[in-house]
Amino acid sequence: MTAVITVMEPPDIFIPTKNSESTLRPCLESVIREFPESKIYIIDDSDSEGCLHIAEAYGVLAVNGGGMNVGSARDLAIKYASTEYMIFVDSDVTLERGFGRIAGVEMKLGADFVNSYVMFGDTNNPTLMTVSEWTRKHGMGVNSFAGAIIRTELARQFRIPHMSAGEDGAFVKVLRRNGYSVRTSLGLIVSHPMTDREALKAYKWYGYSAGKYISVEKGVVRALKVARLGFRVGRVETVILQIRLSTAWIHGFIIRKLEIHFP
């Protein structure tokens, strides 16, 4: 019988919220399912008390964000973390089944920072799922706090930038610069509901992000593979998206090589 690796100490989990009433319930239900013994906090900056009432109904701890942006809310969360690892979860995603078990393995193995893989849109849409599986297979992902495992001492040491957007990428950049490991675990999956059009745009950024960290040889191979995949599936939307992924990879490669920052 195969032993399951677990951590002795359940990680504290933090969910920044801002008028997130429509998505918070399924988010909390998935977190509680995967981490039944963890302390779960919302860092709330909503205009009403809707999120606070939901948190109370689920027995979740609530912290007043005090009008902060999302980066400040995440940084505030560090003060409440009392475990070796902390996990950030966005309020508009749900954790897929098995997230908690795989997170336990990652923490037991001594990870510094591990991203989850974000699956966008309707999981019943075959075009989106074809693209999702392709991006997972080829290791594409983005630096995101949508479902991220962080060693708490590193969060305290480097702090999370007080930014309304991009705080995740900025924090990861600091970790890399200081020699800490940052990677995406393709087994840690979160689902982000959105329209098909929004999902197609989101997957484009996977190609962009991958372009910043892979070699030109691998990039050419990937570009050829996406073209072949698109035509094999025979869906116009898939072909178009794979072309966008390829051009996004080139975009990311240029930024990495020339250090150009496009708007």
Image: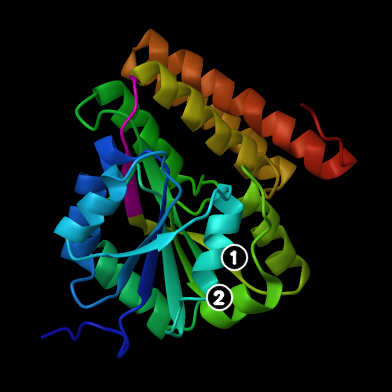
Q: Position of residue 159 (x, y in %)?
A: 66, 69
Horizontal side of 110 relative to 235 (left or right) equals right
Amino acid type, callout 1: Val
The circle on residue 182 is 1
Q: Answer with mark 1 or mark 2, whichever residue precedes in sequence.
A: 2
| Residue 173 found in image quarter | bottom right
Tag 2, which secondary structure?
loop
Nearest the eye: 184 or 160: 160
Nearest the eye: 106 or 21: 21
Q: Residue at x 67, y 40 (%)?
A: 211
Crowding at dot 2, Cα within 10 Å, few <14 / some 14-19 / many 20+, comes out as: many
Report which residue position mark 2 lands on: 112
Pointer 1 with pointer 2, Cβ within 8 A = yes
Crowding at dot 1, Cα within 10 Å, few <14 / some 14-19 / many 20+, comes out as: some
| Residue 229 vertical placement versus 169 (above, below) | above
View extreme (right): residue: 258
Distance, label 1 to label 2, CA atoms, is 7 Å
Nearest the eye: 158 or 7: 158
Q: Position of residue 251 (x, y in %)?
A: 73, 30
Amino acid type, callout 2: Asp
Q: Residue at x 15, y 57 (%)?
A: 57
In the image, residue 192 lies in the stretch drawn in magenta: yes
| Residue 216 vertical placement versus 77 (above, below) | above
